[in-house]
Amino acid sequence: MELCPRAKVPALMLSDASQALISDVFEQPDLFRDSLRVTTRMVLWGGNAQPIPVAHSAAVVSEQKLSERVRPDVPIFEPDVDSPAWTIHSAPPVPTTEHRFGTRIAAAVPVSLKSDPHACWIESLDSGWLFMIPSADGEGWLLAVGGPVESLLDRSLLIASQIAGPVRAAGQFPAFPRISDPLCQPGWLACGTTAMSFDPLCGDGTGHAVREAILAAAVIRAALDGREPLESLLDHYRARLIAGFYRHLELCREFYSKGRSGPWWEAELEHLTKGIAYCQSAMTQGMRFRYQLTGFTLQAIP
């Protein structure tokens, strides 16, 4: 199948912390008031013989709808110079090399649901995993990672029984963690999925992307202000992003070490271990946190 970009996400499941962050940034306290709520997570992971219900609290919203809701409050940017002092690379082409830590490919397909419209489901299989969330009354989205959707559903003990009707094939996209190198240079920053991309299993990509954008804006603001050394600001940006990527890989390793045994899981764990070693090496090369955010402004750490 044709590999498609991950830019358009049909359904985002956002934690309470991510909702609070986005609502605060755009000063819209009611931003998620009408969003569908997920209150239960059904888990069949690793050696569990039976699915385990876990209390959950999240909102489900499409990326397009979320963008439309916040767009009226975002001013239209019209550069008044032909050669801007700074460029934020959020889409190709970008002057970086991409490091990939995994081979897993995912597909997202719409499904009709049989059961609880306020539950999400996650299930590990011998060579991949399935994750399903509701999106509207009786409808949802299925994320299949590690193999063709039909093949994974044939081996499913939990999620397949929650789906009504046939599931059609879908385009595929990469679901492994990736990071660019370098992340920034004088005059430009990589941001969003151009800087790094997360495994959707952990569910922390959207919140991290918002925090990353806040940091990028603060770094450029401080650089234009001229009161702080540029190299110090760029070192801080690198350090923060690599530290966030490192935490994500550690969380992935925890999940994947408990998924299943077998060649697929072992291979993906090996990739994650290499990624963790990459981050550890980068973090020992003199990078450190030099600033802290106060609102949307960087303040030097004494």
Image (cartoon, rainbow, N blue to C red):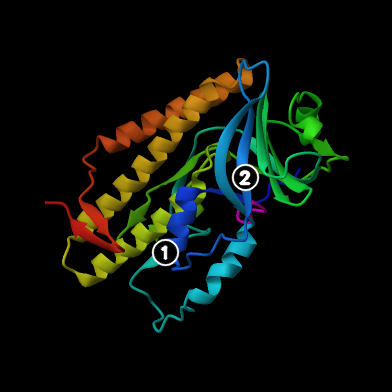
Q: Split into 4 quadrants, where in the image is the N terminus? A: top right
- Does dot 2 land on a helix, a strand or a loop? strand
Q: Label 1, on which residue?
A: 25
Kindly tell me whether residue 133 is visible in this rendering. Answer: yes
Q: What residue is shown at x 16% (from left), y 67% (from top)?
A: 227
In the image, residue 76 sits, relative to residue 173, either above or below, namely below
Q: Amino acid at mark 1?
A: Val
Name which quarter of the figure residue 249 lies in. top left
Between the C-alphas of marks 1 and 2, the distance is 23 Å
In the image, residue 138 sits, relative to residue 252, either above or below, namely below
Q: Is residue 263 left or right of residue 205?
A: right
Query: Of tags 1 and 2, which is closer to the observer?
Result: 2
Q: Residue furthest left?
A: 302
Residue 93: within the magenta? no
Among numbered discs 1 and 2, the one appearing first in the sequence: 1
For the record, the magenta segment spans 5-11
Q: Amino acid at mark 2?
A: Val
Tell me where residue 54 appears, x and y as whole percent: 58, 31
Tell me where residue 80 appears, x and y as whole percent: 40, 84
**Disc 1 crowd, CA 10 A, few/some/many (<14, 14-19, 20+):** some
Residues at circles 1 and 2 in contact by the CB criterion of under 8 Å: no
Tell me where residue 60 appears, x and y as whole percent: 62, 51
Counting labels gives: 2
- Front residue (pair 87, 22): 22
Q: What residue is shown at x 67% (from left), y 53% (from top)?
A: 10
Kindly tell me whether residue 195 is visible in this rendering. Answer: no
Q: Is residue 165 left or right of residue 25?
A: right
Q: Label 2, on which residue?
A: 38
Tell me where residue 154 appears, x and y as whole percent: 81, 26
